[in-house]
Image (tube, rainbow, N blue to C red):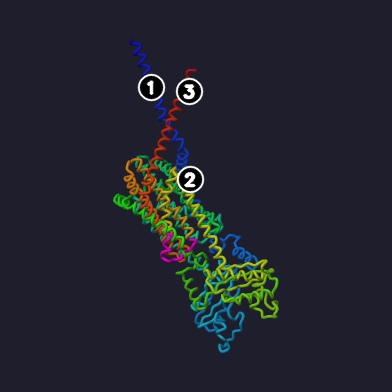
Amino acid sequence: MEDTEIMQNEKSMRKNSQQKSENDESALQAPVVKKEKGRGKQRLADFIVDHNKVIRNIVLMLVLVSAFCFFFVGVNYDLTSYLPDDVESKTAINKMREIFGYPGTGRLMLKDVTIYEAKQYKSAIEKVDGVDQVVWCDTTTQIYTSSSFIDYQDIDEYYKDGCAVMDVTFLGGDTNKLTHRAIDDIEAIIGDHGYIVGMAPTNKFTEENVKAEMKMIMGVAVLFIFVILLFTTTSWFEPVLFLSVIGCAIAINKGTNIFLGTISYITNNICDVLQLATSMDYSVFLLHSYEREREKGLEKTDALKAGLMNTITTILASSLTTFFGFIVLVFMRFTIGFDMGIVMAKSIVCSLLMVIFLMPSLLLSWSDRIDRMRHRPFLPKFHLFSLAVNRISPFVLAVSFLLAGPIYVAQGMNDFMYGPDATGAGPGTSMYAASREIDEKFGRSNLLVAIFPDSDRQKEKRLVKALEDEDYVKKVMGMSAYLPDGVPESILPQSMTELFHKNGYARLLIYIRTKPESPAAYRYAKEVAALIREYYPEEAYITGNTPTTEDMENILIPDYNLVNTLAMISIFLVVAISFQSPIMPVAAMIPIMMAIYTNMAFPYFKGDTLIFIAYAVVSCIQLGSTIDYAISSTDSYIQARRHEDSKKKAAELMTEQSFPSILTSGVILVVCGYSISRISSVPAISEVGRLVGRGAILSVFFVVTMMPVLLRIVDPFITSTMAEKHARRREKAMRLIARGRARRRRRKKGGCA
């Protein structure tokens, strides 16, 4: 009996020991697998931290090389060059450039001058290096020095009330340096007696103002961001760290643009500020993760490795939405989208890499300095704010749904401008004011250029006569304007004849009485083209400001619809994959889309005209850069829901925890946007800044006020997803336990054998 009890006790002990061993083994399995899963990130973090000085030196070398390369990146101020080669106006431009070159043009007005003085000015301007010809009333009509022989009614389109207007053609193109120097010389000659406007002067004006203003914009933005970071961080030195990291990222991004050869002036001058605004959060994520690990008692190096490993996934997920918001621009047919999409998407990649590879080294070097310069948090606790926001959230959602239809319709009814005149020298610029004064005095003069085979001189003369008979045609310049009937072309110098007849082609300069961008201009340009093709049906090319602007309009509208759709689809997929739910991106995108449509509806209600390029680009920028606000709110809600049974309480905690980071990021974007808007005198750049700044305000408002109620509505999907994840983790743990038992049995059998 005693032996039996002993045997039973031994059997029970062996059973308990076996069960404990299996439990211990299963308990160890999960961490082992987790370690396996995160081993790649751990190795990367270890490598970066252990070799931080070498990496820092390499990065600094890249920054220096990039800063050097930046000076060799060309900047393109000619928006017509981004038209596809298969559109009619671009085909005509290419043909004109091939046969006659692509000369720049300008319109000059002299004030308070006599006929004789105007002729003297014209003669001086014709001698300027880079000027091809100056067209005035004396080009085709004999003007005498004595005013008593002049019929002023015959020349009132060229001279009236002591003012003279002349059309200037340059040897180089509108953006050519020789042309710009010639404009400087012309302005020196005429002094205060007048001004020159047109495509070439507009390009020069745009280039000079952009270069001067963007330095100021960047300086103001950096200063304001530094102040913002001082108030939203807990150390006086943290802003220096953040700006140093992003500054290196900006330098590398600008230098690597050398692989593109040239970039547009719009891209070149908004990318730096927007990169600064949209990628600052990545540095904040890493710093906060590092400080949390140090609070756990880890040494600097270990804390940095742990913080870096935890942050890599977060900033990758955060940057993906912004990246896709930018990269979809490459699908635009108007290839400024490719230019802008590549540069801005590359800016996100550069910022990401600098945070991952450079910032750890700077943190190790500057950590003590950051600690010594600690200050108390300036931002308040947002508990009462959170309670108030959650109370009004249902009402904001209800009102938003009621207004969504009208706002969507309104943003689609905006008046848009498409052409170079609007983007470079629109209302508010000195160039615009000068153009208006000339138009009011002498009427509008819009240049169209026609090229056709030089096959029949008499047919060409009949065409010129037919064009001149049209009321909307102001004048037609061709070879017949210089040669009376019966006079041979051979008496003129080759430099004159090649302006209009060259390599088997003829050219006409046709001036119509419209502004470049208007329904009337489009209609008359089509009538001119139809008339020319009646005479030359086999081959004729028509270009000018109006045809290129119309082609830009026909291309940009489908481009906008395409890239906006692609941006929404790509960001929807990123959010859906991140949260493993197709419902979450719907909740996240509702407030952002409401913010975008409200932003774009503002100009309609104010009666303003929008520049379409800015409109199309900013929609993607706002979607890509502010969707993170909704993602941050959703992530905070999910974290709160794990510890709170009440949806209401979880929503309140979510607002309280996520609002400081949303506020910081939003204010930075607002400051950068309005810095661009207020300082830049170039309408296209100023418009982008204004839309970005206002869009950031609206995105912060709609996300903060709508997400609490939206997340409570979709809460069943969140909790079911959490339950599914928990069930999958439990099932995985059970499989690990089963595999552990099977391995143990195999080892036992092997031992027995």
Q: Quadrant of the N terminus?
A: top left
Badge 1 density bin: few <14, some 14–19, many ≥20, Cα 10 Å:
few
Q: Which is more toward the observer, 42 or 512?
A: 512
Pick whichever of labels 3 and 1 is earlier in the sequence: 1
Q: Please name the residue that numbered disc 3 is placed on.
A: 746
Three-letter amino acid code of the residue under disc 2: Val
Q: Is 424 placed above or below 737 here? A: below
Q: Amino acid at mark 3?
A: Arg
Q: Is residue 225 at least partly visible in the picture?
A: no
Q: Quadrant of residue 126?
A: bottom right
Earlier in the chain: of badge 2 and badge 1, it is: 1
Residue name at image x 46 percent, y 69 percent:
427
Q: Along the polypeptide, which appears first: circle 2 or circle 3? A: 2
For mark 3, give the secondary structure. Answer: helix
Verify CB contact (< 8 Å) between mark 2 and mark 1: no
Disc 2: which residue? 54
Closer to us: 166 or 617: 617
User: As drawn, which residue projects farthest toward the bottom?
Assistant: 148
Which region is colored magenta?
Answer: 599-614
Residue found 64% across the figure and 75% down from its top: 464
